[in-house]
Image (tube, coloured by chain):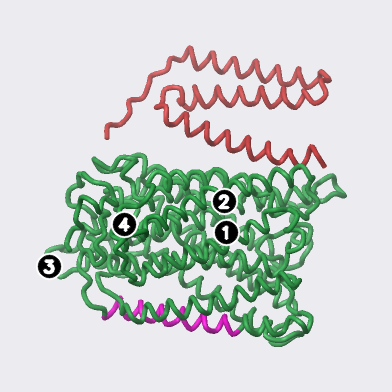
Chain colours: A red, B green
Amino acid sequence: MNEPSHAVVSYRIFIAVWLLLLALTAVTVAVSRVHLGALNIWAALGIASLKSALVIFFFMHLKYEQRIFKIFLLITLVTLALFIGLTFFDVLYR
Amino acid sequence: MTQPTTANAASRGFLTEGGKYPGLLGWIFSTDHKRIGLLYMYSVLAFFLVGVTLGVIIRLELIAPGETIVSAQTYNALFTVHGVIMIFLFIIPGFPAIFGNLFLPIHIGANDVAFPRLNLFSWWLYMAAAALILISLFTGGGPPDTGWTFYVPFSAQTTTNVPLAAFGAFVLGFSSILTGINFVTTVHRLRAPGVYWGRLTLFVWSLYATAWVQILATPMLAITLVLLILERLLGAGLFDPGSGGDPIMFQHLFWIYSHPAVYIMVLPAMGIVSDIIPVFARKPVFGYWAIAFSSIGIASAGSLVWGHHMFVSGMSDMAILVFSLLTFIVAIPSAVKVFNWVATLYKGSISLDPPMLFALTFIFLFSIGGLTGLILGSAATDVHVHDTNFVVGHFHYVMFGGTGFAFFGAMHYWFPKIYGRMYHKKVATLAWGIMFTGFNILYFSMMILGLRGMPRRYYDYLPEYTDLNRVATVGSWILVAGLLLMFVNLIRGARHGAEAGGNPWGGLTLEWTLPSPPPAENFATIPVVDHGPYDYDRVSPPHE
């Protein structure tokens, strides 16, 4: 099997992603000071997910990998979401 | 390689050749998947015998009401350690780590797994974890007495050595995850030309599904046990309502791993049964894709049913409804397999050699175990039999009657391939008969006792339960007699058995194209496969 060739990513993209991550961190802090009730947790989790996605896709090169690795990651995340989601059938209805 | 390979023409394949070091070091530092498989086999079976011994002592205590041979505290430690050893050290690594390592690469025409060193490392992790668990028995406050489930709040309060035992199980989890990662990668990347997905053996399909469960569910166990250790050592208050924690959360976390874990145990067993039946019925397997996808179905649906262990724990009624429904859904792919096995047997040319007897026993005992599982899966009946001996009988039917007997079936099926010799078939059949009899006497009695109200994990009982408890204890002796006969027969066979030849059963899968035992590097040239693993209608078996 041939070794997959490694994509060369420019510094510009890395720096752009880094700045975006910093900006999202600022947004997380800002949102936490606004009272949105239950939406606060969704906002925090949503921003955190976006940041993880940026790290995984750009810094960890998933964007330039074969599709199967993206599918594997998706399976893993869906499983985790189901584990957490099903637990809420207990927590929310107690 | 340092040793000449041409010097001994009568070399016994991987058993004698290969490895950088001589003697024992050549085994414990070998990256050959077959040697690692055998390392696992010897270590896992050693722990199995320890587990059996503890089980026999438990049964002996229950031969009469009141204290007979052990105290209440010792009894608590006995069933805890019996459970921990049997679950974490025997049955979870049993199939994937032993037979998966031995035969998965060969089944797909590869010379090894994708990460051979990681594979060896996972065995070392297994041994390190086993050592931790053994040390936990003799240090600190003595052997844990929580049951293998480590439920809080008791596990956070008992003075016994829970943290070390839990840490041992934590390390074992890593061993299991590494095996899973290795197998998924191997199946995706190392299939020989012609081995496309529709030509994988059903054993490989089941290992593939199992490997995903190992990867996705095992981290949950690791997290749970770390939280438990934090709770004990730092008083984190995660599961303590007084500090804002939630004890039921522990049960969720624990069962999110430990229920899928039963599919880690039983799926590969189903895989080997799917492989044995066509060989001894001389027929193509009925419903290849149905069996293959039911493995994936069981792995997926089975990962979402953990709540059925918690119907009486104080979980919400909504959750009970949802988990009960999901539990019934798992029965569908399980039944798909059973019907397809029976349909494969239909009008087959059946030979009742020992591996086939064990495979058929799997179907019978697993069906009883599965159907009694539905009694436990429906919330209304579960309330009555929860935490009784019925549960103990049920899961021994699934785990021992199912996975255990399939494990022995796999041992008898692949024995001539691994050692190049054949055991005494009549003795093997006799041992099977004795075990089958003892098994049913032992565990069926326990199910009746449970229905009549005898709780599990009690070392004492009311006088009206005496008769059936005696019957069960006698059953345990018969079962052990069969086990001993089987092991003696296999050990004698490995040493003095007649030469088995390359393909004693007439199998079509790739391991039967190799000499027995297989050479250190499985295939001199990577094979090109032009038929499916069960095409008895158009291919005749090699070396027959």
Q: Chain of mark 4?
A: B
Any magenta on residue B476?
yes
Read off the residue under disc 3.
Answer: B7
Give the secondary structure at mark 4: loop
Read off the residue under disc 2.
Answer: B331
Quadrant location, the N terminus of chain B: bottom left
Type of the residue with mark 4: Asp
Same-subunit check for callouts 1 and 4: yes
Q: Is residue B117 depicted above or below A78 in this figure?
A: below
Classify mark 2: residues with Cα within 10 Å, few (<14), some (14-19) or many (20+).
some
Question: Which mark is first along the chain, 4 or 1?
Answer: 4
Cα distance in 3D space between marks 1 and 2: 8 Å
Q: Quadrant of residue B38?
A: bottom left
Read off the residue under disc 1.
Answer: B370
Task: Please indicate whether residue B55 sits to the left or right of residue B49 in the image.
Answer: right
One can see residue B90 in this view: no
Type of the residue with mark 1: Gly
Read off the residue under disc 4.
Answer: B32
Q: Given this view, does label 3 or label 4 mark the residue nearer the observer?
A: 4
* Depth order, front residue of B28/B334: B334
Cα distance in 3D space between marks 3 and 2: 56 Å
Q: Given this view, does label 3 or label 1 mark the residue nearer the observer?
A: 1
Residue under the point 40% across and 70% down = B357
Classify mark 3: residues with Cα within 10 Å, few (<14), some (14-19) or many (20+).
few
Classify mark 1: residues with Cα within 10 Å, few (<14), some (14-19) or many (20+).
many
Residue under the point 54% across and 25% down = A55
Q: Position of residue B374 (x, y in %)?
A: 64, 56
Q: Is residue B433 depicted above or below B98 in this figure?
A: below
Give the secondary structure at mark 3: loop
Question: Which mark is first along the chain, 2 or 3?
Answer: 3
Question: Which mark is first along the chain, 2 or 1?
Answer: 2
Give the secondary structure at mark 1: helix
